[in-house]
């Protein structure tokens, strides 16, 4: 298990376009594993390689649904439909949320860590997460597209 340091806004790497992965090497596979460990350690639901300072088109996502952990190389949005509007946060911008308009359902294709093509369709949180992470690969952070940005409200500790 290797936890990487999460890059924080306003680091310039978060605003650059990540490069396509041409060859899946053991280093790429290790990076995907490290990204998953880092995401879980930070209690996130998604992480893109630029968030750990690496300009490669790699994402990991786990929204706690039947898909489990998704590791995707060179993800591409194939289709989107519908609309959802709601709060988003980001591990690279702690303490800040924003209201973002996203597609309700998306289909994303890419490669798994073994180089096999995968296509996943998801709605709700999974769609939001895919779009958020793919935005990171294109140098876009959620505050760039949020209709409203505000401080995150801390969850209450304990029970009343």
Image (cartoon, rainbow, N blue to C red):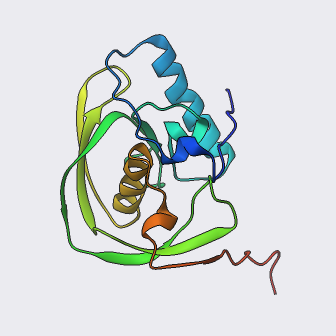
Instruction: Say which residue appears at 63% left-offset and 46% top-offset.
Output: 11
Q: Which residue is located at x 62 percent, y 44 percent?
A: 40
The reply to whether residue 89 is in sight is yes
In this picture, residue 124 sits left or right of residue 28: left
Q: Quadrant of residue 6?
A: top right
Count every numbered label the image shows and give the total: 0
Q: Is residue 134 left or right of residue 109?
A: right
**Where does residue 159 sit, x and y in percent of width and height?**
80, 81
Residue at 46% in and 65% down: 144
Q: Quadrant of residue 20?
A: top left
> Which residue is at the front of the view, 25 or 17?
17
Left or right: 37, with 76 as reference point: right
Looking at the image, is 69 positioned above or below residue 64?
Answer: above
Quadrant of the image containing the N terminus: top right
In the rendered image, the residue lying farthest to the top is 26
Q: Is residue 45 above or below residue 117?
A: below
Image coords of residue 109 (percent x, y): 23, 40
Position of residue 104 relative to residue 111, above or below, is: below
- The residue drawn where x is 67% and y is 33% is 4
In the foreground, 9 or 155: 9
Q: Is residue 69 visible?
A: no
The correct choice, above or below, for 153 with respect to 20 in the image is below
Estimate the x, y position of residue 28 in percent, counting from the top left.
46, 20
Q: Quadrant of the C terminus?
A: bottom right
In the rendered image, the residue lying farthest to the bottom is: 160
**Residue 155 coordinates in the image, percent (x, y):** 73, 75
């Amino acid at each position: 298990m290797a936890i990487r340091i999460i890059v924080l806004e306003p680091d310039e790497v978060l605003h650059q376009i990540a490069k396509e992965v041409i060859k899946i090497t053991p280093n790429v596979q290790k990076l995907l594993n490290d990204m998953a460990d880092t995401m879980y350690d930070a209690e996130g639901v998604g992480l893109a390689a630029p968030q750990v300072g690496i300009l490669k088109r790699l994402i990991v996502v786990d929204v706690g649904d039947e898909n489990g952990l998704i590791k995707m190389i060179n993800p591409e949005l194939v289709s989107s439909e519908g609309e959802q509007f709601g709060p988003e946060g980001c591990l690279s911008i702690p303490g800040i949320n924003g209201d973002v308009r996203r597609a309700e359902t998306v289909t994303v294709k890419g490669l798994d860590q073994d180089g096999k093509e995968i296509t996943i369709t998801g709605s709700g949180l999974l769609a939001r997460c895919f779009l958020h992470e793919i935005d990171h690969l294109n140098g876009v952070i959620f505050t760039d597209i949020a209709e409203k940005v505000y401080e995150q409200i801390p969850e209450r500790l304990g029970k009343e």
